[in-house]
Structure formats: structure tokens, C-alpha cells
Image (cartoon, helix red, strand yellow):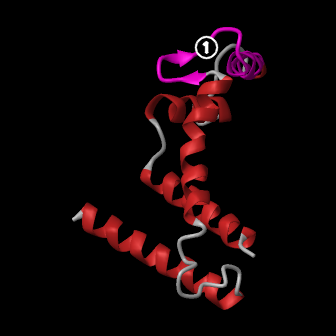
Amino acid sequence: MAFAAASLWASQLASSMVSAATVLNLGRLTSGTTLVPLPFVAVAVGSVPVVLSAIGFTGTGIAASSIAAKMMSSAAIANGGGVAAGSLVATLQSVGAAGLSLASKAILASVGFTFGALAMP
């Protein structure tokens, strides 16, 4: 049941993105050009784990002497010794350790699609 709802939601999201791009003429969606924004979608979704890992939010925890460690230290000092649940540092560590949720991937994909449509000649 949940899979069917997610599938329906994803198809509605894709349909609305194509409709919005067509109405606003952002993507100039004519025959043969609808796949141009897809590389932007892949970059938007695929770059998040790479960037998070590069700044220190890894699957095994926050890397020592990294930007993430400095962020965690600042957050802990600001909160009296601990990192607050739901804070930026906690959220980035969660994504770094577990990856993006389906909803987050859909949001990033729509942003990537929009940038890709804007970049089209």
C-alpha cells in the first residue's frame, strides 16, 4: 500500500514538473529535448552524499579535524555541551550516515530538473 502511494505521488510530482516547465516554457519541452535536464537531476541527488562525506559527515560518524567536527563543536558549545536533536549538525550527520530519504531525493530531483530546464538553450 505504501509503495503504491509513493509511486502515485512520484508520478504526480513528475507530471506537475513537466506541466510547470511547459506552462512557463522553461524547458522548451519539445520532442527529443525532454531528457536534457536529467543529468542535472543526477548531479543534484548524487552529489549530496559525496559533499557530506568530503566535509566530514561519514557513515561511521563525524571525521576528526573536519569541517563537520568544527560545526559539531560550535553546536555543542552553543547548546551547553551537547548537539540538539533536529539541529543542522544532527540532520547532516543523519543523512551522512543513512543517506537521503525518498522525499529528500524527490525534492532534490525537482530542484535539479528546474535548474536543468533553466540551463537549456
Quarter holding the N terminus is bottom left
Question: Which residue appears at 66% of the width and 84% of the height?
Answer: 28
User: What span is in magenta?
Assistant: 57-77
Q: Please give left or right for residue 94 compared with residue 37 in the image.
A: left
Question: Which residue appears at 60% of the width and 50% of the height?
Answer: 43
Query: Residue 47, how many percent across, how many down?
Result: 60, 42
* 100 vs 38, nearest the viewer: 38
Quarter holding the C terminus is bottom right
Query: Residue 20, how many percent across, how many down?
Result: 62, 83
- Vertical comparison of 107 with 100: above or below: below
Q: Please give left or right for residue 42 compared with residue 22 in the image.
A: left
Q: Quarter of the image holding residue 38?
A: bottom right
Q: Which residue is mark 1?
A: 63
Q: Quarter of the image holding residue 115?
A: bottom right
Question: Which residue appears at 76% of the width and 16% of the height?
Answer: 77
* 1 vs 63, nearest the viewer: 63
Q: SS class of the residue under badge 1?
A: loop
* 93 is within the stretch colored magenta: no
Query: Residue 3, how many percent across, how many down?
Result: 26, 62
* 62 is within the stretch colored magenta: yes
Q: Please give left or right for residue 121 compared with residue 39 in the image.
A: right
Residue type for callout 1: Ala
